[in-house]
Image: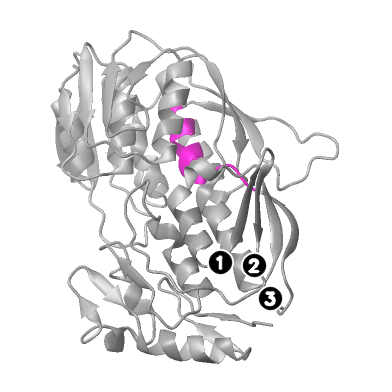
Amino acid sequence: MDRIRIIGGEPLKGTIPISGAKNAALPLMIASLLTRETLTLKNIPRLADVSLLGRILGNHAVDVTAVGKKMGQSTTEGQTFKLKAGEIVDTTAPYEMVSRMRASFWVLAPLLARCGEAKVSLPGGCAIGTRRVDLHLTTLESLGVSIELEGGYVIAKALKGLTGARVTLTKVSVGATHNALMAAVLARGETLIENAAREPEVADLANCLNKMGAKIEGIGSSILQVQGVDRLHGAEHTVIPDRIETGTYAMAAAMTNGDVVLEGARADLLQEVLQTLRSTGLEIEERPSGLRVAWNGGALNPVSVETRPFPGFSTDLQSACCSHVHGKRPLQSAGDYFRQSLHAYSGADKARGPHRAPGRYRLRHRGERTARRASHGQRSSCLSLAYHRWTCRRR
């Protein structure tokens, strides 16, 4: 697909089914390496990354079967995968596959836990900036793994098996927490993971591992206690709904003066985001089937946003929030995650300098001008902190 043509100017109305979370589905698929039995995963999103990971797992002799499409089933509905890693015939994850998607680096921990050795290419596939894997490696070293770097590959060995230990992550990392969990569940003894990521995707992985026979306590907190077991068994698990997709559609409803029902969405996965949207004046109603998001009929209020790890405001929703909010007070965003992304904005050099405070970007001059124009119902260009400037029309 070379481009997407959008003819706007109409409110969004109707029901939108929320997909399964990609960031939860990928580590869950990788967790299938931890058992010889079948792991059944429901609500898997239909994405290229999912297909790519399926091919990577196939390289390790994991049998990945997508349950056939049922009569009348929409292509937007999640898939059901059955994954079985009976015998792992190859513990090498090659560069040509791993370099295309960062999450595939997470096969390192389950390969070590199951086979005692792994050779995994250093990851790629991430445009957000420099994100090193040092934390992943030091975490595994704490569990008794010897690691060498050679020719762009991580060569890891634990021929006598993994040993439980106290693991303290020097910074919050979802990926490192995933790796630590998948290694610790088959390690001898108890592992204590401190400063663990609290993201719902981490909790979803931990809940699935418990269904497979793992013993993990403290799920959803920053301290995870893992009692190692000898083996894991098969299980059935449903992937949580995508909180980023939920937030994006909610903001799209606000930008277009719309009224939408987000089917399958869960409010507990993005409480601070929903609170921020309510502060702008958006009406949000929790229903048994999901969330209803509607424009309140008036002008949206300005808000200040600071991105933080969960349960804070997600960085992935930062740009969409900038696009949807019109107000005279500047929308503020913080964190190092989008330092490089700011350069994609054509006025980035002007935004830096007098409007910049330590650790925080204050985007004011263009935002205020946009707000004044938007308040008169005219066409406005809305600043996006990520990679685009969105054009929207206010009625």
Q: Is residue 138 left or right of residue 294?
A: left
Mark 3 sits on what residue?
Answer: 6
Mark 1 sits on what residue?
Answer: 281
**Amino acid residing under circle 2:** Asn
Instruction: Identify the secondary structure beneath mark 1.
Output: loop
Between circles 1 and 3, the one closer to the viewer is 1
Label 3 near label 2: C-beta < 8 Å?
no
Q: Is residue 382 above or below residue 314?
A: below
Of label 1 and label 3, which has the lower sequence position? 3
Q: Is residue 94 left or right of residue 165?
A: right
Which is nearer the eye, 235 or 223? 223
> Is the C terminus in the top left, top right, bottom left or bottom right quadrant?
bottom right
Label 1 near label 2: C-beta < 8 Å?
yes
Mark 2 sits on what residue?
Answer: 296
* Marks 2/1: CA–CA distance: 6 Å
> Is the N terminus in the top left, top right, bottom left or bottom right quadrant?
bottom right
**Amino acid residing under circle 3:** Ile
User: In the rendering, at what x and y percent does residue 243 appear?
Assistant: 52, 48
Please give the range of residues in magenta.
18-31
**Amino acid residing under circle 1:** Gly
User: In the rendering, at what x and y percent does residue 78 appear?
Assistant: 66, 40
Please report the residue visible at 47 percent of the width from the left and 32 percent of the height from the top. Answer: 28
